[in-house]
Image (tube, coloured by chain):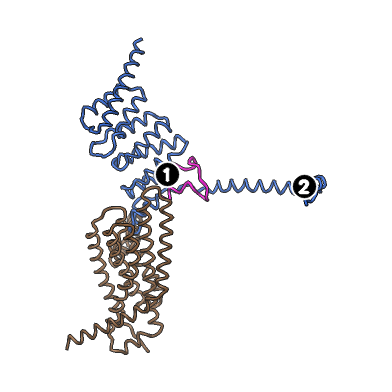
Chain colours: A brown, B blue
Amino acid sequence: MINVLNTHLYAQTITLFRYFMLGILNRRLFGLLSVLLVVAFLVSGFVYELAIINSREIAIALLADFLRYSMALLILLLITSNIAEDFENRQFGRLLTMPISRWQYVTAQVLVVSATSIILVLPAFLVSIYFVSVEIAIYWTVALWLELLLVGLIGFLAILSLEKVPLAVFLALAIYVLSKLSVLISQMLAESVRLSDGELANRFAASVFAGILHLLPGLESFAQNDVFFEKLELISVLGTQFQTVFIYAIFIIMACLVDFYRKEFNL
Amino acid sequence: MRRSERPLTQVPRPILLGFAIGLFLQILNHQNLDNKSDFNFKPLAEPHRAKIYEGMSMGSYQLFSYLLTMRLQLHDNQVGRHIPYNKINYSVLVEWLEMLNALNADSEYPMMLASRVYSQTRDKEQLRILLTHIDRIFKSNPQIHWRRQAEATVIAKHQLGDKKLALHMATSLKELPGFIEMPHWARDMQFLLLADLNEYESAIAIIQALLQSGSISDPDELRFLQEKLLSFQQKLSKSQQIESQ
């Protein structure tokens, strides 16, 4: 009996996932991906011409980073606009009149984020395998997938909480950029404390930011672009990234569940 | 059919005067714009500390260091024009090069810019600042930077005309420990410069020490050193004969 129930819940979640994926996959997405690839090649080709030495490595690393940030923005827009439509069309209310649990909706959306990330990293894999060794191409693809998964989940939480695309994208981007610039901000705050001879306000700001940092993913949660220039322990770097992303993903999914279960939907 | 023209004297004087004023204004305006774009040259701002740029790189440390290096490489091209090197403040330029080197110690790019691009200056003072920088950075990582030190040695000798500085730089190459992998010609630069300075005895002593150490196994290198030894010995005995007469 329990097995039958579990199978039924599983089938329902997968159906939901398929239904949501249809909202993501369209011709415009593949068109946009193609345009992004062309622009990435043009930019890196320009830098390739400019560089006097190490031009190949610089161009590949730039191409990879260009695709990384474009894809991060793209996944945020895809996820947030897709869920925002559910809010606008009062889809949640209708879904919840069916025998579907809220956790199933969240699970289906997490699957959508994972699948969309896979679709987005595929061009990056095809490009990188052409220019770099198989190990580096695989590393970059998996690491980029983990990064996009993280960004997508942050976007999911942001749109669930704020319900408006611009606000959600802005918040998710702020978290992403803040995480990436955390080293710089910590340095600046530490310097301001030093220059002000340890003034209370500066120390307070530094300690508040140090507290916020505990809620942000660290730099090790993101793909390491240095692989294009030097030999890194790829398995070890990827292992650390997987661990941090996994823990952060659990934290974000739990936050999504808490937020979603607290929402009131009226038809 | 060609239309016949009236002589210039037929043109009213105010029109001719107007044309002359127009021509003068155009030339003046062009000159002014030239000076203005000259004035618009943006000097290099002093760099921040390497740690700041490291934080700004958003995790892509090496890529960011290369992009900053390329930005420095393009500094002498502004508004589509090549800016003469003597307009660049070489002290600030060296600060940038040092920061870039600190940001990515494994990169050869900043030192290559110093030895190949910014060494094109005709200002000897600027060149000296640059060569001193190359010498300093070379000592921090000789395995990566021996090529630039060798290039700087040649620049010091031929472009700057300071054979003593060139000898100092060549000596630092010669004194590198054996585990630093570099071709023999880079180590041989010192005795070639000594010979240039008519210090044949020192050059001979160095070559003899090299030959006796057994560290040279390449037959071409051995032949080259033996030929140089013979040549320097002949030159030394000639100069001694001249002195005794």
The x, y position of residue A53, in whole percent, is: 37, 48
Element carrying mark 2: helix
The x, y position of residue A161, in whole percent, is: 35, 77
Q: Residue furthest front?
A: B1
Quickly name the residue at label 1: B93
The x, y position of residue B41, in whole percent, is: 52, 47
What type of secondary structure mainly makes up the magenta span?
A: helix
The answer to which image quadrant residue A7 occupies is bottom left
Q: Which mark is residue A57?
A: none
Q: Residue at x 36, y 48 (%)?
A: B100
The answer to which image quadrant residue A115 occupies is bottom left
Q: Which chain hosts label 1? A: B
In this rendering, does residue B203 appear at all? no
Could you tell me which quadrant the C terminus of chain A lies in?
bottom left
The x, y position of residue B210, in whole percent, is: 24, 29
Q: Is B89 a magenta residue?
A: yes
Graded by Cα atoms within 10 Å as few (under 14), some (14 to 19) or many (20 or more), the crowding at tag 2 reads: few
| Marks 2, 1: nearer the viewer | 2
User: In the rendered structure, which segment of residues is drawn in magenta?
Assistant: B70-94
Q: Residue at x 35, y 59 (%)?
A: B58
Q: Residue furthest top?
A: B245
Element carrying mark 1: helix
Report if the CB atoms under discs 2 and 1 are less than 8 Å apart.
no
Q: Is residue A238 left or right of residue B123?
A: left
Q: Which chain hosts label 2? A: B
Q: Amino acid at mark 1?
A: Leu
Label 2 or label 1, whichever comes before in sequence order: 2
- Marks 2 and 1, Cα distance to the nearest angstrom? 52 Å
Q: Amino acid at mark 2?
A: Leu
Q: Which mark is residue B16?
A: 2
Give the answer, above or below, for where A261 lies relative to A191.
below
